[in-house]
Image (cartoon, rainbow, N blue to C red):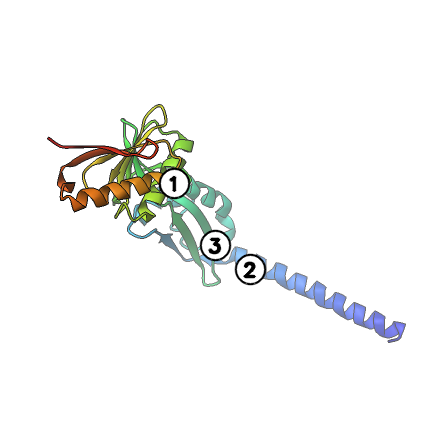
Amino acid sequence: MTWVKRIVVLFTWLIVLIGGGFALISSQNVRQERPIIRYQVDIQHPDNQQFLIEDDLQKILQSAGAPWDSVARVEINIPLLEENLRKHPLVLGAEVFSTWEGVLHVEIVQKQAKARMSNELEMIYVDNQGATFPLSAHASAVLPLLTGHLDSAARVESLFLLDQARQHPAFPGGWTALHRDDQGTYTAYPAWHAHSLNWGDAADFKVKAHKAHALYAQILQAKSMDSLQWADVRFADQIVYGFRD
């Protein structure tokens, strides 16, 4: 290829790039000036946890100018709107964008509760990171209850114990409640039968669960399960238990 052809090809590509850049800028400007004719809120809920509804977000949307009847997109502060939506205590994530048809989409991801927690003043939810958020005014979820001395690290540890119990055959249905005292010692309450388990610390879950499983098999065989009141799995190579009078 001669140097003349190279120059022609180079200038051709340069014109294409410049033209494409101008077209993109023009397209963005047209989109920014395009009027918003309506908006749509979509909320993604975890299964059986519809804590958040559109009405809960109306004050935030109205403060940003909703319903935006024929308002140019450029006049809507979308980053600020997203930031304010994310500040709602039940919102995990928020994204706002518009379409060529003039519809402003508000996409919301609701927080998911993994347990309830009582701190003696109020009942709140705990997410999978151990963070807390308030109950919903519209719905509630049947979840294990955490009580006692629970900072953020202890909440994460408690959720890990609940998850392990949920998966272990000794505890059909998992645990309905878990209490942690000021020494870091846990007491668990299995879902399948009304008795308490003095669990100790969070270590050696499989060993303790195996002891509980063996005890249940023994008591079921003796047809004494209805009388079981408590069991203690903290001791090495043994399990202590007691019956109701």
Q: Nearer the viewer, mark 3 or mark 2?
A: 3
Q: Against 8, is 134 above or below?
A: above
Residue 160 placement: quadrant: top left
User: If you read the primary sequence from the N terminus, does the residue marked by circle 3 or circle 2 appear first?
Assistant: 2
Q: Tell me if I can see residue 113 in this picture.
A: no
What residue is disc 3 on?
A: 97
How far across and how far down the image is residue 101, in percent?
Answer: 45, 63
Q: Nearer the viewer, residue 143 or 122?
A: 143
* Residue at the extreme front: 237
- Under mark 1, the amino acid is Phe
Given contact means CB atoms under 8 Å apart, are the residues at marks 3 and 1 in contact? no
How far across and how far down the image is residue 211, in percent?
Answer: 30, 40
* Residue at the extreme right: 3
Q: CA distance from mark 3 to mark 2?
A: 15 Å
Q: Nearer the viewer, mark 3 or mark 1?
A: 1
- Under mark 3, the amino acid is Phe
Which residue corresponds to the image point at 24% horizontal and 41% vertical from the top-left? 215
Which residue corresponds to the image point at 44% horizontal and 48% vertical from the top-left? 94
Q: Nearer the viewer, residue 15 or 87?
A: 87
* Residue at the extreme left: 245
How far across and how far down the image is residue 114, in percent?
Answer: 34, 43
Q: Regarding mark 2 in the picture, which secondary structure is present there?
A: helix
What residue is disc 2 on?
A: 30
User: If you read the primary sequence from the N terminus, does the residue marked by circle 3 or circle 1 appear first?
Assistant: 3
Given contact means CB atoms under 8 Å apart, are the residues at marks 3 and 2 in contact? no
Q: Regarding mark 3 in the picture, which secondary structure is present there?
A: strand
Q: Is residue 243 left or right of residue 233?
A: left
Q: Regarding mark 1 in the picture, which secondary structure is present there?
A: helix
- Under mark 2, the amino acid is Val
What residue is disc 1 on?
A: 160
Q: Nearer the viewer, residue 138 or 56?
A: 138
